[in-house]
Amino acid sequence: MSAYQIAVLPGDGIGPEVTREAERAVLAAAAAFNFEVSLEYWPIGGTALDEFDTPFPDATQDACLAADAVFLGAIGGPKWDHETGARRCEAALLSLRKTLGGYANLRPVIVPESLVESSPLRAERVAGTDLLIVRELTGGIYFGQPRSSSTERASNAMVYDRDEIERIARTAFNLARKRKGHLTSVDKANVLEVSQLWRGVVTELHKSEFSDVELEHLYIDNAAIQLILRPSQFDVIVTGNLFGDILSDLAGTLPGSLGILPSASVGGRVGLFEPVHGSAPDIAGKGYANPAGALLSTVMMLQALGENEAGAHIQHGVVKTLEDGILTRDLGGTASTGEFGNAVLNHAFSSTPVTV
Ligand code: NAD
Ligand code: IPM
Ligand code: MN
């Protein structure tokens, strides 16, 4: 029987609330599909800072490196926003990502049929949206040197090496090949040298290895508007760290909530799976955070571990729950986080009735 060790980092705000639903789904999947999981909980972010005086304890780092997969809820919040440098919650998340090495952050965006009518955008625009943002995650302006800070002047540098561009582009081309065969590369090559290199390397790789994939280049400002005007025409989008961060939050408007978007960071030593959203301090502790993004991140984790059938069942559970109109408040419903999770488990593993 396969056995997986999963490091679970619930984090801050709604992180633990949505992580709880993900854990229940993983445990139910293991029971239904005959594999073993051991879930180990580790502190990160503000809760770690409060208890251990660092947002990224060494023990957390070691456990993540030793695990088969890492699941993270969310980090950060107003309580810790005054912190600077390595004491920031966000710095802990960036260190975790760099340590694990997953440079390809996959952020799929689908608008299920049942949400088309309730999307803030017109139904005919969002219907059929099924796209994948491939965000470069371990380079770019988030990590570029030099960086500096003083009370009068501060700077960050957007830096990419040829190798970093080539490997993320290769990942994106390969994914496009398995999907609809279309790749959009997003940059700011009309202004930034780093984007001119990006565009050049993507174009070269297209010519040499992926001429069967249709390649299009868009500037980031135009990409933002196109994502809203014609989302269903995108297949795979590849872009750098900062542009990918912004575009993926924007893409949350398509299904109507950031709360349903999942992500997987792959290509490194250990895979990292986390919803796209943050700790949502405005709704933390209220019990109605949407756990769909966390649950779909679990699907991506199970797929990466080779448990495709188990993943498919949870995905089916999420889609059916949305179809049943069991929605949390962000999508206009009244369901609690736990009620949504129960409905998903009942659909996914109907022979195993569940209660909160
Ligand atoms: P956010 O994603 O936490 O929230 C943005 C908006 O979306 C809020 O109105 C929130 O209520 C809503 N929302 C987000 N997730 C939701 C869910 N699952 N269900 C229902 N509504 C949801 O972004 P923010 O407010 O800009 O950031 C808050 C904190 O989270 C900051 O400290 C930020 O740095 C951190 N953050 C962490 C991560 C992460 O851990 N991966 C990601 C983004 C932001
Ligand atoms: C995300 C978040 C993070 C990022 C922050 C919290 C460091 O916004 O995962 O999208 O910018 O990558
Ligand atoms: Mn973000």
Image (cartoon, grey):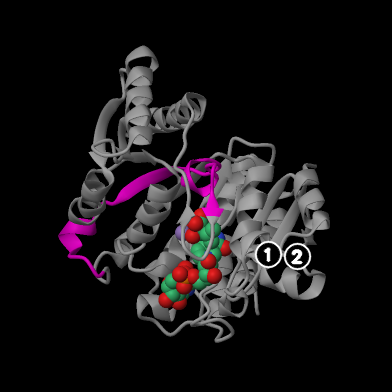
- In front of the other: 83 or 250: 83
Vertical relation: 280 (above or below) 300: below
Going by the numbered disc 2, the residue's amino acid type is Thr
Residue at image mark 2: 54
Q: Is residue 26 magenta?
A: no
Give the residue drawn at x 31%, y 19%. Answer: 212
Residue at image mark 1: 87
Location of the N terminus by quadrant is top right
Going by the numbered disc 1, the residue's amino acid type is Arg
Quadrant for residue 98, please give it.
top right
Vertical relation: 131 (above or below) 22: above
Instruction: Locate residue 25, reporting x and y percent.
Output: 63, 62
- SS category of the residue bearing label 1: helix
- SS category of the residue bearing label 2: loop
- In front of the other: 38 or 59: 59
Q: Residues within 10 Å of mark 1 (few under 14, many from 20)?
A: some
> For the residue with label 1, is its CB less than 8 Å from the closest atom of ligand 1?
no
Location of the C terminus by quadrant is bottom right
Q: Residue furthest toward the top? A: 208
Residues in magenta, as a range: 120-148
Total numbered circles: 2
Are circles 1 and 2 on residues that touch, CB within 8 Å?
A: yes
Vertical relation: 355 (above or below) 44: below
